[in-house]
Each structure stands twice: as structure tokens, then as C-alpha cells.
Image: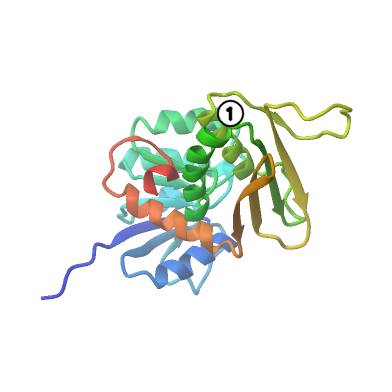
Amino acid sequence: MGMVIKMTKIILCGCSGAMGRTITRLVAEDDSAKIVAGVDIVPNKDAGYPIFANIEDCNIEADALIDFSRPELLADILNYCEERQLPAVLCTTGYTDEQLADIDESSKKTAIMKSANYSIGINVITKLLKEATKILSKEGYDIEIVEKHHNQKVDAPSGTALALAESINEAAGGAYEFIYDRSQRREKRAKKELGISAVRGGTIVGDHDVIFAGEDEVITFSHRAYSKAVFGKGAIACAKFLEGKGPGKYDMSDVV
């Protein structure tokens, strides 16, 4: 008798958008996950699962929800997940401070995953950066972050660059000041500056370089995303991880 593979049943919010379609394709190739329902105002006949315009109308049992929709739908999603104690992987960005507080409140009732970046590679690098910082910061290495994204991205620096900077600063006991622009400064670089630079152009999906520059040597941690599929893979891994978990706020670092 063959081994039974555990199947994680997923509700996908924003299923007709670019990331929703990417996740649909990835799950179709995954033996241990299945999308049982989608939520989107845009119908998609090729989805292969029922799609509801409103999440309240979705009456299908699931193990986890993945959200790649819009921030204004958050309240409905949180209500739905709280009522059913359904774990949620929140991949939408641009939440207000009030919405972040609502997410914290909901995590007391059900499992919620929220991460600045759902790439498994970025989250492995984050762990490595903490170890590197503990050693190299003490040795006086200067730390700089350079991030590059496509010309349609409206925010700078990226949320991922900020999350990398925060994890470095945490490992260094909060010693660094983040510097975003040196154009108005006529002075040498301070020892405890952490420079964060943003490049925007073309169709760059997302590049992040963290540079440790020391006396006569440079160590660089680089991550390149070649397609948005890396974020979809990470979100699916999180949905599997959250299945059966109790209430609480989880992070991608719990998964990797």
C-alpha cells in the first residue's frame, strides 16, 4: 500500500490576478496542495475551482487561506478566518497602521502569517545576515543595502530592503541609523550608518544586495528573483506550514 500524501486545501483570494494565476499553476503541479475555492470579482473560467465574488459567500471547507488581493478586503478576510479559525497567509502589501493592529488582534483567534517577502531564499539570507552581522559589525565593517526593482514600483526603498536592514540592526543591538540619501551631506560616512539605496528600471523583479565592506575585503550577500513564482512557492509553503496551527502571528522565519 502506497504512502498517503497529506493534501492541504487552500482558498485563494485574488485568484484572477497575476499572482493568483501563478499560484493556481504552481498548486496544479503540487501533489500535496489543492485550491478548493477562489475569491475574486473577476471570473476566470480556466481556474478549475469555483470562484466567489465575495468571501462571505464561500461555503467550502479548507485548511488555509492565501491572500494576494487588495488591502481594502482585509476586514472581510479576517472576519471570515476568525469565524472558522482558518489560518491565513497574508501576502498583500500596503496595510495602514490600523489594519496592522487588526491583524495582530485576529492572530489571537486564528493563525496568521505575515512576512515582508515570501521568497524562501530571502528568508534564508535573513538568517545568514544575522550571523554575519554579529561577527562583522564588531570588526568595523560598513554595511550597505542596494535594492533594484521594476519601473512600476511606487515605494522606495522596498519592504524587503527595510526588513533586511531591521534584521541586521536587531543582530547589532539597534546600533545602526538607516540613511536613505547622502546628496545633501558633505561629511564622511559615520561608523554606524546603514545605507539603503533604491534603483528603479525596466522589468527587474527584485534584486537585493547586502554589502559588508571592510578593510581590503568585501563580502556581499545577493538575492535575485527572476520571476514572481518564487513568492508564490513561498506562500504555498506557508499555507502547508500553518495547517492545524493554533492562534498566533507567524513569520516566514518560522517556516525556513
Q: Position of residue 27 (x, y in %)?
A: 41, 67
In-front residue for pair 177/98: 177
Q: Quadrant of residue 215?
A: top right
Q: Is residue 128 above or below residue 178?
A: below
Q: Residue at x 80, y 34 (%)?
A: 181
Q: Is residue 194 above or below residue 28?
A: above
In-front residue for pair 186/233: 186
Determine which residue is flagged by label 1. 97
Q: Residues within 10 Å of mark 1 (few under 14, many from 20)?
A: few
Left or right: 148 in relation to 81: right
Q: Position of residue 77 (x, y in %)?
A: 46, 43
In-front residue for pair 231/107: 231
Q: Residue at x 40, y 33 (%)?
A: 106
Q: Is residue 3 visible?
A: yes
**Element type at marker 1?**
helix
State the quadrant of the N terminus.
bottom left
Q: Position of residue 78 (x, y in %)?
A: 44, 39
Q: Quadrant of residue 82?
A: top left
Give amino acid for label 1: Asp
Question: Which residue sits furthest front?
Answer: 216
Left or right: 191 in relation to 256: right
Q: Residue at x 48, y 45 (%)?
A: 128
